[in-house]
Amino acid sequence: MSTNDDRVEERLNELEIKASFTEDLVEQLNQIIIRQQQDLEALARQIGQLRERLPEPDTGQARSARDELPPHY
């Protein structure tokens, strides 16, 4: 019986180790998700600010690519 008990204890230790690593991994992934959410919120704010800077659309005039020449021209 001692051999069987040793095997059960060994398997239990392995499961506890795996559970510990799994908990650490879940916590790391949770932190990554939190950072990504913060990044998404910051990007959404930046997009909102950029939209506020856009000029109002002209009164029905179509914009031409030539109207959008870079500043070095």
Image (spheres, rainbow, N blue to C red):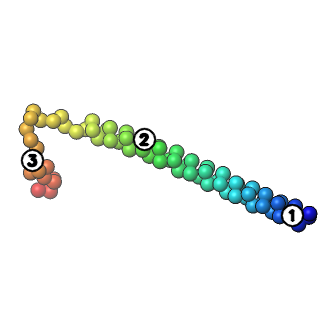
Which residue matches tag 1? 4
Which residue matches tag 2? 41
Task: Give SS at disc 2.
Answer: helix
Q: Is residue 13 above or below residue 54?
A: below
Label 2 Cα crowd, 10 Å radius (few <14 / some 14-19 / many 20+): few
Q: Which residue lies furthest to the right in this view?
A: 1
Q: Residue at x 9, y 33 (%)?
A: 59
Q: Residue furthest bottom?
A: 3
First in sequence, mark 3 or 2: give its number.
Answer: 2
Residue depth check, mark 1 versus mark 2: number of the one nearer the observer: 1
Which residue matches tag 3? 64
**Closer-to-camera residue (49/61):** 61
Q: Do the residues labelled 1 and 2 touch (CB within 8 Å)?
A: no
* Residue 65 image position (x, y, % from top left): 11, 50
Rounded to the nearest angstrom, the CA distance separating label 3 from label 1 is 82 Å
Task: Give SS at disc 1.
Answer: helix
Q: Do the residues labelled 3 and 2 touch (CB within 8 Å)?
A: no
**Closer-to-camera residue (68/22):** 22
Q: Residue at x 16, y 54 (%)?
A: 70
Rounded to the nearest angstrom, the CA distance separating label 1 from label 2 is 55 Å
Going by the numbered disc 3, the residue's amino acid type is Ser
Residue depth check, mark 3 versus mark 1: number of the one nearer the observer: 1
* Residue 17 image position (x, y, % from top left): 73, 58
Q: Which residue is drawn at 42% across and 44% down?
A: 40
First in sequence, mark 1 or 2: give its number.
Answer: 1
Going by the numbered disc 2, the residue's amino acid type is Glu
Label 1 Cα crowd, 10 Å radius (few <14 / some 14-19 / many 20+): few
